[in-house]
Amino acid sequence: MKPIVQISLDLINISEALDTAQKAVRAGVDWLEAGTPLLLAAGLTAVKELRAAFPTHPIVADLKTMDGGWLEAEMMAKAGATHVVVMGRAHRATIKQVVQAGRDYGVAVMGDNLGAGSKPDCSRMMQDLGVDYIVHHTGFDERRDAEEIALHGAVPSPLDELAAVVAAVNIPVQAVGGLSIEQAISMPRHGAPLVVIGAPLAVDADRFKTAAGDLEAILREIVTRIRTEN
């Protein structure tokens, strides 16, 4: 599939999120993600306002569902989300319920393997249960934990198991978690065509705020390079 570029709006102010999304859309970003911090801060209103402002853009609701799968997916779908996220560490019954809600409401389901003991096995399991995409995820806290860094001998990265995850499934993969600009641009060449731009590229890594600098110009460069180099 052709690369798709998604911005993660991990912000806590709706006005700031809408402004950042506008810059992203002008730069050519394809999908808008209502990040978990934004959903915690503003709930369904965040999805509704993004939908009203960007009526034709796909909107990912990163709710990280762990239980109540059908109901949470239904809420996000009715608010205007086109994609919802369920965690691979949730019970299989929850993943099945989110998938069923996705079918009932015409919403795509993204399965997130954050925290899984074997991310390839977790990703394959979620594919078998019917998710449409895999989010191969190295978490914010994991990347900053001294014990994890010592265990790996380096800062944990989505690149660590990406090849194995891609080989384990035949649905599109998205790699998330502290990627540099060059790493993000290279993701389609690693078999992960759904490219997410979040912290630290679009969002301040230490605060739920838009990153400093000319974000629109940075995003435009990233989008252009992703489409011309892959």
Image: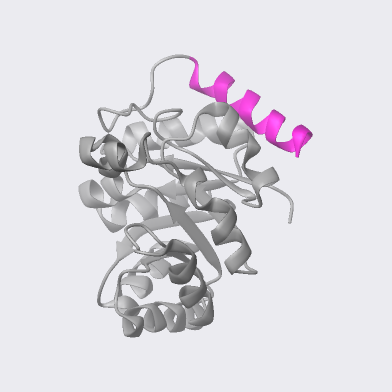
Residue 185 vertical position relative to residue 81 in the rendered view, above or below: above
Residue 198 appears left or right of 89: right
Residue 145 vertical position relative to residue 202 in the rendered view, above or below: below
What's the magenta bit mostly, secondary-structure-wise? helix
Please name the residue shown 43% across and 62% down the image: 119
Please name the residue shown 32% across and 58% down the image: 115
Q: Position of residue 33 (x, y in %)?
A: 44, 48
Q: Position of residue 149 (x, y in %)?
A: 30, 37
Residue 217 is covered by the magenta coloring: yes
Residue 138 appears left or right of 194: left
Residue 169 position by quadrant: bottom right
Q: Position of residue 125 (x, y in %)?
A: 47, 77
| 73 or 182, nearer to the observer | 182
Q: Quadrant location of the N terminus?
A: bottom right
Residue 197 is covered by the magenta coloring: no
Residue 57 vertical position relative to residue 19 in the rendered view, above or below: below
Residue 163 appears left or right of 80: right
Question: Looking at this rendering, what residue extends furthest in the top direction?
Answer: 213
Q: Which residues are magenta?
A: 214-230
Q: How many marks?
A: 0
Residue 172: in sight, yes or no? no
Residue 27: in sight, yes or no? yes
Please name the residue shown 76% across and 33% down the image: 229
Please name the residue shown 36% across and 36% down the image: 153
| 16 or 131, nearer to the observer | 131
Q: Position of residue 218 (x, y in %)?
A: 56, 21
Q: Quadrant location of the C terminus?
A: top right
